[in-house]
Amino acid sequence: MDSLHDVMRSIRPETKAGKDHLSVFKEFLAHLDQLQRKALASRPRVKPAARRKPTRRTKV
């Protein structure tokens, strides 16, 4: 029975020693933030169009 347990552990290691969910989620968010910053940096800057004042309507 001990050899069976040894074989099972070698096939699938203990999962309790793995990263916790919060650290994995934080790492995921850091990757998303990095990708967003990279996309914004590579995008050419465009001047915003000059805003015009809305025309006043005359009372009839």
Image (cartoon, rainbow, N blue to C red):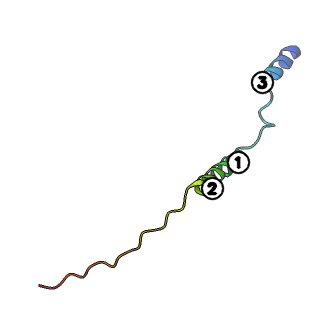
Please state the horizontal and vertical placement of residue 45, each as a whole percent of the image.
Answer: 54, 62
Q: Counting other residues with Cα less than 10 Å from the Cα at mark 2, is it few (<14), some (14-19), or many (20 or more)?
A: few
The amino acid pointed to by label 2 is Arg
Q: In the rendered view, would you say 43 is above or below 6?
A: below
Residue that mark 3 sits on: 12
> Helix, strand, or loop for circle 1?
helix
The amino acid pointed to by label 3 is Arg
> Closest to the observer: 12 or 28?
28
Q: Distance from label 2 to label 1 (Cα)?
A: 15 Å
**Quarter residue 51 falls in:** bottom left
Q: Counting other residues with Cα less than 10 Å from the Cα at mark 3, is it few (<14), some (14-19), or many (20 or more)?
A: few
Residue that mark 2 sits on: 37
Q: In the rendered view, would you say 14 is above or below 32?
A: above
Ranked by sequence position, the earlier of labels 2 and 1 is: 1
Please state the horizontal and vertical placement of residue 34, each as a whole percent of the image.
Answer: 66, 52
> Closest to the observer: 55 or 11?
55
Ranked by sequence position, the earlier of labels 3 and 1 is: 3
Please state the horizontal and vertical placement of residue 57, each as a whole percent of the image.
Answer: 20, 81
> Helix, strand, or loop for circle 2?
helix
- Farthest-out residue, left: 60
Specify the quadrant that holds the N terminus: top right
The disc placed on residue 27 is: 1
- Farthest-out residue, bottom: 59
Residue located 68% across and 51% down the image? 30
